[in-house]
Image (cartoon, grey):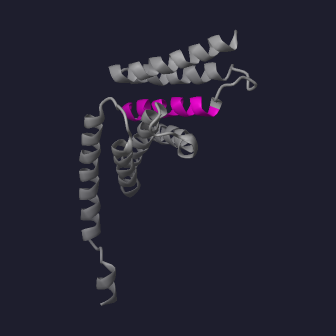
């Protein structure tokens, strides 16, 4: 197959995954992401194609599909793979910024659901800051910000109750 056709098919599968996520077909979205990554691996390394970047796009989308399916460990792994790329080379105000924000948010959800509330709260705050800093449109921005606020309130409530039982501030400890 010609490289241009392979690239087009890989991006088409990734685009399908995004539409399937929006439609609530999370299992299909995960399958489309896998298909996109398989297709991209057929593209020769000599071609001018950013394999790492494309995989990061796929892993960000896959992470959201996994957490929506309740597969939080897999979501966390996918988010971490996406963030390895985005944290080094991501451009928040480019189109890929949407996927970067999605990867941070997905990691926060996965951390919350796997029992790491403090880490999750940090990633929710980071996602909120990224949304506020991003110039340009972000579909579902208000709903995402609302979900971040709700999840942070829930997390902070549980963290405060844990701290209160047996927690001593440093000045109480030394007095």
Q: Is residue 24 visible?
A: no
Does 132 appear above or below 122? above
From the image, give the main secondary structure of the stretch colored magenta: helix
Q: Is residue 164 visible?
A: yes
Which region shows up in magenta?
Answer: 52-69
Is 166 in front, or is 133? 133
Rendering quarter of residue 45: top right
Rendering quarter of residue 11: top right
The N terminus lies in quadrant = top right
Q: Which residue does the image show at 26% across and 63% down from the upper left? A: 160
Residue furthest to the front in view is 135
Whether the magenta-drawn stretch holds residue 66 is answered as yes
What is the x, y in percent for residue 30? 47, 25
Residue furthest to the bottom in view is 175
Q: Which residue does the image show at 52% across and 15% down from the upper left? A: 12
The C terminus lies in quadrant = bottom left
What is the x, y in percent for residue 99? 45, 34
Whether the magenta-drawn stretch holds residue 104 is answered as no
**Relative to 105, is 40 on the left or the right?**
right
What is the x, y in percent for residue 86? 53, 41
What is the x, y in percent for residue 34? 55, 24
Q: Which residue does the image show at 40% across and 24% down from the upper left? A: 26
């Amino acid at each position: 197959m010609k490289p241009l056709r392979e690239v087009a098919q890989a991006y088409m599968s990734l685009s399908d995954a995004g539409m399937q996520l929006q439609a609530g077909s999370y299992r299909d979205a995960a399958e489309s992401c896998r298909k996109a990554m398989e297709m991209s691996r057929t593209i020769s390394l000599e071609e001018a194609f950013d394999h790492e970047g494309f995989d990061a796009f796929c892993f960000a989308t896959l992470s959201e599909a996994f957490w929506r399916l309740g597969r939080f460990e897999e979501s966390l792994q996918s988010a971490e793979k996406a963030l390895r790329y985005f944290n080094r080379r991501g451009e928040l105000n480019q189109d890929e910024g949407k996927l970067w924000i999605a990867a941070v948010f997905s990691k926060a959800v996965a951390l919350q659901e796997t029992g790491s509330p403090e880490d999750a709260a940090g990633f929710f705050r980071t996602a909120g800051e990224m949304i506020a800093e991003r110039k340009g449109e972000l579909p579902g921005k208000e709903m995402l910000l609302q979900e971040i606020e709700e999840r942070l309130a829930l997390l902070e409530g549980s963290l405060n109750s844990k701290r209160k039982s047996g927690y001593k501030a440093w000045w109480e400890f030394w007095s």
